[in-house]
Image (cartoon, rainbow, N blue to C red):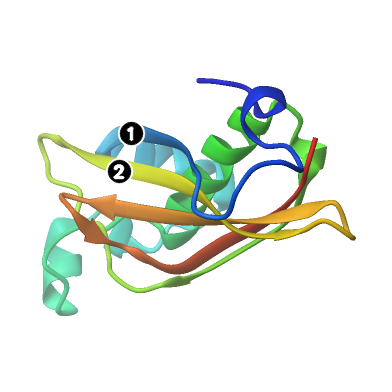
Amino acid sequence: MATAAIGLTAATEVGTELYTVTQTVDRARLVRYAGASGDFNPIHWNERFATEVGLPGVIAHGMLTMGLAGATLTDWLGDPARLVSLGCRFTRPIVVPDPGEVEVSVRAAVGALDPDAGTARVDLTVSVDGTTVLGKAQAHVRVA
């Protein structure tokens, strides 16, 4: 992945695509995230329970999905301290099959520039099979 020193400067134009990265999510990743976060809600690991409460199956944690988006950005920036803020809306669940995995795509593009503040808004499109799963996923970052 390219570094931000090359791809995000004060001269970058609004609309510039910065990167697209794909992350894999499987049930083992859900278990590891549950352990790290303390979120052991059975909708994230128990198929029977998830379907009984009306879900199509076991779903990924929303914060895991947001974390994947944020991690791709801070990896690309090269310095996590350049991330000023990150926010999103959880709009669609990610169903994680067993056995199997889901490919989560994160695309980043410049949404706005604030030369006076030395920051940029980065719009993140997070999707599975072409369907967006996070709404209004945006980050504000310091420009190199």
Q: On the rendered image, what quadrant is the C terminus found in?
A: top right
Q: Which residue is mark 2?
A: 104
Residue ID at (57%, 50%): 37
Give x and y (percent) for residue 133: 31, 63
Mark 2 vs 1, N-terminal side: 1
Residue ID at (40%, 57%): 61
Q: Which residue is mark 1?
A: 22
Judge whether residue 34 can be spotted in this image: no
Residue ID at (78%, 53%): 119
Task: From the viewer's side, name the closer residue of 123 and 103.
Answer: 123
Give above or below for 64 relative to 6.
below
Give x and y (percent) for residue 93: 27, 65
Are the residues at dot 2 and dot 1 in contact (C-beta closer than 8 Å)?
yes
Give above or below for 42 relative to 28.
below
Label 2: element kind: strand
Task: From the viewer's side, name the closer residue of 123 and 30.
Answer: 123
Give x and y (percent) for residue 131: 20, 60
Taking the view exactly as shown, the residue that stands out farthest to the right is: 116
Indicate the amino acid at tag 1.
Thr
